[in-house]
Amino acid sequence: MGRIAVVTGGTRGIGAAISRALAKAGYQVAANYHSDHGAAEKFHGETNIPVFSWDVASWEACQNGAEAVRKHLGGGIELLINNAGITKDRMLHKMSLDEWNSVVAVNLGSVFNMSRVVINSMRERNFGRIINMSSVNGIRGQVGQTNYSATKAAIIGFTKALALESASKGITVNAIAPGYISTDMTDMMDPKIKEKIMTGIPAGRLGTPEEIAAAVLFLGADSSSYITGITLSINGGQYL
């Protein structure tokens, strides 16, 4: 059987593309989701990939969720994709404490929770792959996204530090920073705003979830054992 992989936020958008690509490559995949049961059921019906519901912002839920995956798939988690994330956009002078705290808890707290849950078993087996989803807006910032940008920038620092701690144990820790990717969210954009965004992308188009998934396959492979602590920007040449 293939290595066991968990993808948080793994039943929709970029996460769903990652889950599908990993399963096609022979991994035993568990796709995490939180509350969209309809989307998760549809995803499971289309892919036969097992889905598990837990709140990645909760330490206890992550412990229980990881244990459920271990029991279902019969082994420890070897590849972790910290993909789950939310946005609650607002200018800082109008942002509520809840809008700040909830984004930090889901986007950044989940990365600690899930990495902490799996790191000891990875260290024991002298193998592991952790891939954290950052964002171009964690590198350059974005108006109305102080909460989101802060979490995505912090993920890069987390990635570098954990990579240093883990390299001697055969564990790699890397980040991916997508630019604008074609998802349900970008599909709902005002066409004029989308057109303006496109003019700033040298490649002349939005990226696809499958292109992010291809990077995950590369960084997650056994053969990528000498690549750790990097942030791989996938943005069509934007902001170079």
Image (tube, rainbow, N blue to C red):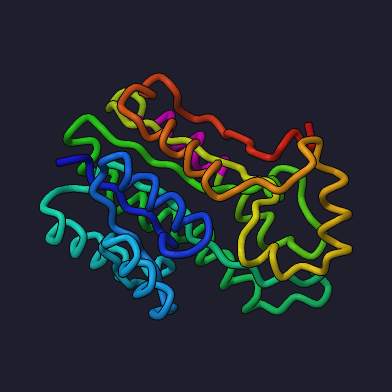
* Image quarter hosting the N terminus: top left
Residue 153 at least partly seen: no
User: Residue visible at 51% across and 66% down?
Assistant: 105
Q: Residue 213 location in percent, x, y? A: 48, 44
Total marks in image = 0
User: Residue visible at 44% across and 78% down?
Assistant: 36
Name the image quarter holding residue 189: bottom right
Q: Residue 193 location in percent, x, y? A: 86, 62
Tell me: residue 210, above or below residue 173: below
User: Residue visible at 58% across and 33% down?
Assistant: 232
Q: Is residue 136 left or right of residue 225?
A: right
Stretch of the chain drawn in magenta: 156-166
Q: Is residue 53 left or right of residue 12?
A: left
Q: Residue 101 location in percent, x, y? A: 59, 71
**Is residue 36 shown in magenta?**
no
* Image quarter hosting the C terminus: top right
Q: Residue 164 location in percent, x, y? A: 43, 29
**Is residue 160 shown in magenta?**
yes
